[in-house]
Image (tube, rainbow, N blue to C red):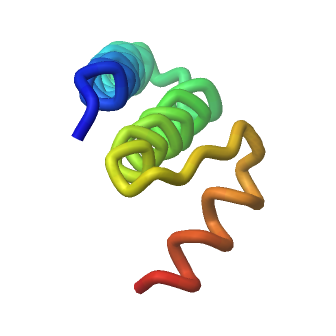
Amino acid sequence: MESSVIQLSQYRFERAVEMLNDAKILLKQKSYASSVNRSYYSIFHALRAMTALEGFDSSKHAGVIAYIIKNS
């Protein structure tokens, strides 16, 4: 596997972790809608990190969801 793909995956996973940490902070502040939003994007970036390793990429949420469903 190319190092550029691994680096891309790592970057996306780091973004996922960052957004999850933001979600936790927002939850403690009782900013529930914003916490849910950050949680959603954390999952989205984690999935994009995973699919990058499989050679798939989509910036659209629907594309990532369809790929995951198709390949589950």
Find residue 4 and report its image quarter. Answer: top left
Q: For the point 38% across and 56% down, which residue is it?
A: 54
Image height of 9 relative to 67, above or below? above
* Residue placed furthest toward the front: 2
Please state if 32 lies on the left or on the right of 11 as rendered.
right
Q: For the point 59% across and 70% down, which residue is it?
A: 67
Image height of 36 relative to 29, above or below? below
Q: For the point 47% across and 82% down, which residue is it?
A: 71
Query: Looking at the rendering, in which quadrant would you find the C terminus?
Result: bottom left
In the rendered image, residue 13, in percent from the top left (x then y), is placed at 30, 28
In the rendered image, residue 25, in percent from the top left (x then y), is placed at 33, 14
In the rendered image, residue 16, in percent from the top left (x then y), is placed at 37, 28
Q: How many marks?
A: 0
Front residue (pair 8, 60): 8
Find residue 20 and report its image quarter. Answer: top left
Q: For the point 76% across and 60% down, which residue is it?
A: 62
In the rendered image, residue 40, in percent from the top left (x then y), is placed at 54, 43
Query: Looking at the rendering, in which quadrant would you find the N terminus?
Result: top left
Find residue 2 and report its image quarter. Answer: top left
